[in-house]
Image: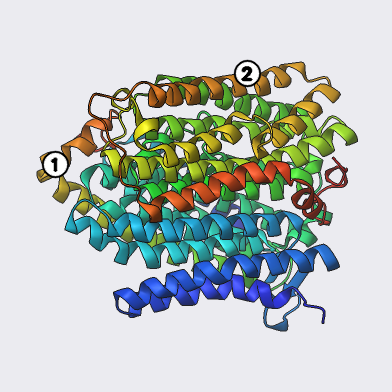
Amino acid sequence: MILSGEPFMVILLLLPLAAAILDLLLPKRAATAVLFLAALVLPPAAAGLGAAVLKTGAISYQLGGWETPLGIRLYADGLSTLMLLLTSVIGSAISIYAVSYFAEGSNPAERQRIDMFQPVWLIGWTGLNGLFLSGDIFNLYVCLEILTLTSICLIAVAGTHASIRAALRYLPIAIAGSLFYLLGVAVLYGASGTLDLELLAGRITHETHFLIAFALMVTGLLIKAALFPAHYWLPPAHANAPAPVSALLSGLVVTAAFYILLRIASGLFAPVETPGWAGLLGILGAISVLWGGLQALRQDRLKMVVAYSTVSQVGYGFLLFPLTLAGSAAAGYAWNGAVYFALAHAVAKAAAFLAVGALMHQIGHDRLQEMTGAAWRSPFILMAFALASLSLMGLPPSAGFVAKWMLLKSALLSGHWGYGMVIVGGGILAMAYLFRVLEIAMRAPPEGWSRLPLPKGLAFPAMVLAVTAVLLGVFSDLPLRLLQVGPVVADWGRVAP
Amino acid sequence: MTTAGLYLATGLAVFVLGAVGLFWHSNLIRRALALNFMATGVFLFLVALGRRSTIPFADPVPHALVLTGIVVAVSTTALLLVLICRFHETAENKSADATEDEKGRTETAGDRE
């Protein structure tokens, strides 16, 4: 029996949506059961799609049987399947974590928040899956907007003044980013007469219209992906949200924006991408890497350290643009490295935020200077945080190491020594700010310390993701093989590592 | 300039006006209005695009995009207004979550008037 990929695509799209609606209608316990069911079914569905894509190549699915110029197409290749797998693994861990997190909340009002969290998060999951399955640029916009709106609701879900302030800080800039992207889509449609990614690929030339469309779309996505100088909204938003939401925002939402950028900027817009453009994106990426790292070093709250680390790590992905101009071998490493970096960062950062949330639940705050001895009082959670840190720093054998190695190799092969130094320097900065945390945690605990009770529902999802981040480094062959499937990616993308 | 071209240019102008307003003002209600300006600018641009082609009738695709866009813009505005209300409601019992608050060394999200 050969399984085709299309049913999996439909499941990945409809199941979270149906679960979200059921979640709103059902009483509390049944609603939680629905969330767990979705968390149980979606990872195998994504794996099934992955197997099908590996076997048959990229899959297009014409919705309702309408052909592309008229109809809307779902599309899955190696890149999108990897992202779907990533979403399902992180999403499942976050779902399980969130139920314990809100149930064990410090006050009754907080415990009620799960009723709001569940359906909104499931709609966000629908948006994520839809985004990764979209075959046209307008669908990408709609899914991005679903994701943005649900992110805003989730930032505000705690209902405190600080969280609403963070949501209000994020909303205008996020929506403005979407509108820049939408205007870019409009210009692109006006110039090419199509929205479909595949049809667009043949119609984009070096005319000014396309350059304007490209600039508008990229501007919108840079804001969403929090690249320097549009990064300022990220740390407060990510640090003031409840821990499962921080994990979701830093792990998946930022990655989704980067994914769209990969889709449109690598290959599709090649005719208008000059070295100047690519260099600008690369330099902004390099500044992000260093600036985010330096800021992370200065923070005195653990959540802010992890949030600034996201600003730093997002920057790495953008080194892709100057490095892919260099020629085939270097470009192949850059492409694989950048995508693998996005995967590694998403898993490790989600694990780090979940671990920090578990730690905050145990000790009641995240002020760094008062965390002395946390490693003795809560060894399991600190272990999860340390494993996630391993990947964030890019130490072997973690996924972060594999990704940075490929990026570094690409930088050296193409003679971009400056970017090579940024890659290494960012890693050193990451070591500095993460070892600073671990050093405080490993100091002698205060007098009369005792081992804190372990919140299992919080600790295990964090540990599973942290271990995944390391395992992705050891078993990097399969994901990299999956990544090679896909015609939308330009030819230089398919060079073996 | 053709009529369609005039509309296109107007759409862009409204978008830019909104974008400038968004970054200029810190008052939340003004920012909500600025976002709506930006959205309206894009919609006007899209509607005008439908007329640009050489075919005698209007291209329906951009119009369909505008319909979707309007739905998004309305929901966004609603969410933003609800959040602004909640922002002011929670400001009164701010001391209740002071621990949460002192961490936000970042200044208030606008609303300095």
Nearest the viewer among B19 and A279 is A279
Q: In this view, does A290 lie above or below A278?
A: above
Q: Can residue A464 be seen in this view?
A: yes
Nearest the viewer among A217 and A436 is A436
**Quadrant, the N terminus of chain A:** bottom right
**Disc 2 on helix, strand or loop?**
helix
Q: Which amino acid does label 2 sit on?
A: Gly
| Parent chain of label 2 | A
Residue corresponding to mark 2: A425
Which residue is located at x 88 percent, y 47 percent? A491
**Quadrant, the C terminus of chain A:** top right
Q: How many labels does the image show?
A: 2
Nearest the viewer among A333 and A230 is A333
A232 left or right, relative to A349: left
Query: Residue A300 location in percent, x, y?
Result: 34, 24
Q: Do the residues labelled 2 and 1 touch (CB within 8 Å)?
A: no
A359 left or right, relative to B15: left
Residue corresponding to mark 1: B94
Which quarter of the figure has residue A387? top right
Q: Which amino acid does label 1 sit on?
A: Lys
Q: Is residue A248 visible?
A: no
Q: In this view, does B102 lie above or below A428?
A: below
Which residue is located at x 78 percent, y 48 percent? A480
**Disc 1 on helix, strand or loop?**
helix
A496 left or right, relative to A27: right
Which residue is located at x 78 percent, y 65 percent? A53
Q: Residues within 10 Å of mark 2 (few under 14, many from 20)?
A: some
Q: Is residue A135 above or below residue A252?
A: below
| Parent chain of label 1 | B
Residue A226 numbered tag: none
Query: Residue A290 location in percent, x, y?
Result: 56, 21
Query: Residue B86 location in percent, x, y?
Result: 20, 53
